[in-house]
Amino acid sequence: MNTAITILADGVAYASWLFIVALGLTLVFGVLKILNVAHGSFYAVGAYAAATFVAWFAAWGFAPWLSLVALLLGSVAVAALLAPLTERGLLRVFYGRDEVLLVLVTYALFLVLEDVMKLVWGVNPYFVTAPYALFGNVQIGGQSYVGYDLALVVVAIVCGLGVWWGLNRTRTGKVVLAVIHSAEIAASMGVNVGRVYTFAFMFGIFLAALGGALTAPMISVQPGVGVAVVIVSFAVVIIGGLGSIEGAAIGALIVGLARSLAVHTWPPAELFSIYVAMAVVLIFRPEGLFQRVKTRRI
Amino acid sequence: MRRAAALGLMVLAALLAGGLLAPKWLLFLIAMSAANGLVSLGIVLMMRGGVVSFGQGLVFAGGGYAAALLSNKLGVSDALLLAGAGGAAAVLLAAPFAPLLARYRGIFFAMLTLALSMVLYGVLMKSEGLGGSDGFNMRRPTLLGFSPSDAWSGYALYALVVTIAVALAVAARVYFDSARGLVALAIRENELRVEYLGASVRRVMALDFVFAAFLGGVGGALAVMALGHIEPQFSYWTTSGEFVFVSILAGHHSVAAVFAASLVLELVRSFSSAYFPNTWQLALGLFLLIVIRFLPQGLGSLFAKLASRAP
Amino acid sequence: MKSVALAVSLLFAASASAQETFKLGIVSFLSGPAAESFGVPAVNGAKVVLDAFNKGQAPAPYNKAGFGGMRVEPVFVDENGGATKQVQELRNLYDREKVDAVLGYVGSGDCLAVAPAAEEMKKFLILYDCGTPRIFEDGQYKYVFRTASHAVMDNVALARYLKARGIKFSTVNYINQDYAWGHDSRSDFKAATSQLFPGVKHQADLLPKFGAGQYGTEISALLSQPADLTHSSLWGGDLQAFILQAGPRDLFKKTQVVLSAADHVLPGLGERMPDGVILGARGAYGLMSPKTPLNDWWWKLYSDAYKVYPVQAPYRMVQSLLGLKLAVEKAMAANGGKKPTGEQIAAALKGSEWESPAGRIRMALGDGHQAIQDTAIGRTKYDPAKKMVTLVDIQRFNAECVNPPAGVKGEDWIKGGFKGAKCD
């Protein structure tokens, strides 16, 4: 029984982390139709920014719990500085071109950001462990879990609900939904599509950076932290359906639970589980599990 | 057809002659870019039908591993045989997926091909018998019974790769200009109308996928022979991404542009490494961005414009 | 008259100092996950040592300026980007940059790819870091050398340490990265402990993806079937993440963790590194290095330049450079003082021995192309006064105890009960 609880707890904890990280990716695709390969890089920048902000807060003598605020501020800073620059300065130039071309643009951006991060922060690792100890330990199913990891579950739920509520219950959100369904029609109805794009991209980047910032306390922040995140986020959003919030949540849960099951019962399956899941979903339900009905244009 | 063949022969002669004068590192670089160019040619072939494959690594690795295993385990050493076997193995690997993939377009085609190539990556990483993540080495191949001496082996390999590449390039050009090849362009424009006009879109797409697999497999086999080493990285998504970049850089109009683009990428990568050892990724990324920005239709459009200006 | 003599002597002086340079290609990770733990420290070590060489400031017998009077000019290349790129870069180094020798390679896959390429080009190559024993067990080379022990030593020493210290255990869990290094480390340790501790049960065999960074699930799996011993060859960012995530969950209290190559994370982790972890450094490096004048010189040289003590990566680099320097000078003595060819350096390096900051390096395996060296294993203990992690209970193992004898494959040697091992 305990094993089952452990598998569930591990699956949900990992899924929450995945969801926070992948949510931004699915949003950016949903609105701008761009599959952002540099998502991992923004995640990494978020982690580095978190390291910097937490260090500043500590130097200014703030209380330890304020380090959480530092993490948040770091992500906001990243989004505020990098997102407009990237969207207006770079991506805007390529709108209207082939989807896959934009993927390549973001791949080039990923390469650029890898070295920019190295130039700004160097190669030495940064440790941001102050927030990790804030929530103590929690016993679940006979195992001691770090409270912070479980707090992430709460954060994931808050993010998911927040984004859903923002999209479906606010005016701005409905405008964004309109742009998601058809940018052309929305523009002809008077929506400033360019501004919606910028805003959506900024929010997506904020979420990516937040993912990185929240992960920073449990890893050593150094070159290469963003690379593994890219493929795992891709798998989650593909499985759930590109552009769907609910899809990202379900996708994250599927990947998280599948991985947890594999690690606890048959470890060799772990490497495959994600790619096979991705391939299976693509073969049988290519639009992901939450298909959006699309009209066929002739 | 005759024009393509004549052009091809001229280019081949020039490359073979020039190769005698070029330094060894350049010969190797050109050989690698020709082998990689074949893989990108496969992507261009599919691009003409409107889909971009992000998983050519699958057939690149498939062909490479097949050639390397044939050489090591079965003692097959003839280079032409190995190249052909690489192509055949890749076709066998890809054929079961062709009818499935023929139904996909856009980002889903790209993602499914990526997923398949990553599954192969996973399989190869786990196969201890194939060297796992380290891969394994391959002996130098022979050519039609000859085993070139150490001084000539570099040129011999270069000559082999370049000859096969030019031959397949000419074949590709002929196919592109043929009726079936032109249907692909029509599919890119508007599939539904092509169906109504009586052609089978699915059949063309599936066949193109198989042809692209053959090209990728031959490219993989040639790459393995040039490097003497194969590893699972051949099937990784970043490797596939580079092939896609070359195809986008080249555009889908000109076959020669594909090899030119492949060479340009290798040169840029090589010199970035030499002059910016600490920031070569930045240099490469900036180069990619500049190219995508200023050559919207790829290098091929430059060629086409030049050709159309002729009276 | 005096001015003419002055001019002539200046001309001679100028031509004497405008002598040949020895161009040395150095390849290691300058980007990517291995940069911080292995690549950049090694390159830093190379820079500071070559600078000392060129100024003739190294202690005897390394005190000739440069290599036998020739100024050493390094060319640095990033090892990141895959084995295919590395073969291309190797060719560029020899054919385009016209280097006289190449020294490099951390990744086993890269080593396996470049070794045959260098051999085919008949160019001199030293592999300074990669761990796979396969290079000289599966192949024979004339131009390729490895100036450090291969990875079999790491896990055999770890097993012998447990035996020597009388540490009792009956179950072992494994967590290693899912690639050749992780697989081989796990297999070596499993085989070694099966030999030295018959009846030991090998339980969980976890192989998380390289670079995963998130180990919550794996840690739960390790805790749900606890073992007396937990073995890992994790390194770099992955190891640091694992320690940060496993520490608060008391994994280190519930099991004895043994790490085969972990010394490089100690300076960065500091207080966060739990006490009592048994670890190796792939040689007598860093805090386990012997107290000799050469080591003192090297330690001061590196620490003064980089404000941190040298760990395994720069040690492996410096022992390689020292060996190369002696080989070049020996070859020059044999050929009348000219810059030696690759063949001449190879002939001089083959089967040679030299003193390094980590002890004596002997090219005893692989027909004189593969080095063996002593190693040491220790236990972590944080020293609050010095504000750094120190290593206690250090035990040294001489080279013949933990390396296979000539002509025997590492895997076979372990499974055959370490026949021919000379332990004191």
Image (cartoon, coloured by chain):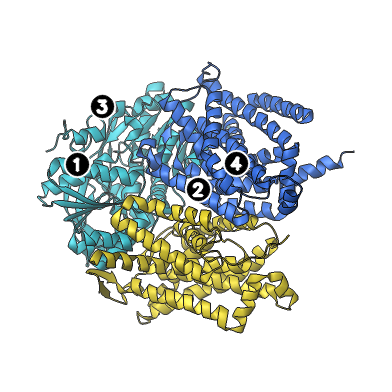
The chain letter under disc 4 is B
Is the residue under label 2 in contact with that under label 1 (CB below 8 Å)?
no
Chain A, hue in figure = yellow
> What residue would you read off at disc 3?
C407
Residue type at mark 1: give it: Ala
Establish if C143 lies above or below C248: above
Residue found at the very far right of the displayed protein: B311
Q: Residue at x 25, y 64 (%)?
A: A3
Q: Find residue B116 and name its label.
A: 2
Is the residue under label 3 in contact with that under label 2 (CB below 8 Å)?
no
> What residue would you read off at disc 4?
B266
Residue type at mark 3: give it: Gly
Query: Sequence order check: which comes first, mark 3 or mark 1?
Result: 1
The chain letter under disc 1 is C
Label 2: how many Cα within 10 Å (few below 14, some 14–19, many 20+): many
The chain letter under disc 3 is C
Q: Which chain's colour is blue? A: B
- Residue B163 spot, x, y in % from top left: 64, 27
Disc 4 to disc 3, how far (Cα)?
41 Å
- Residue A130 spot, x, y in % from top left: 34, 73
Mark nearest the camera among 4 and 2 is 2
Mark nearest the camera among 3 and 1 is 1
Q: Residue at x 65, y 25 (%)?
A: B21
Q: Quadrant of the C terminus of chain C?
A: top left
- Residue C86 spot, x, y in % from top left: 48, 40
> What residue would you read off at disc 1?
C192
The chain letter under disc 2 is B
Establish if C122 lies above or below A210: above
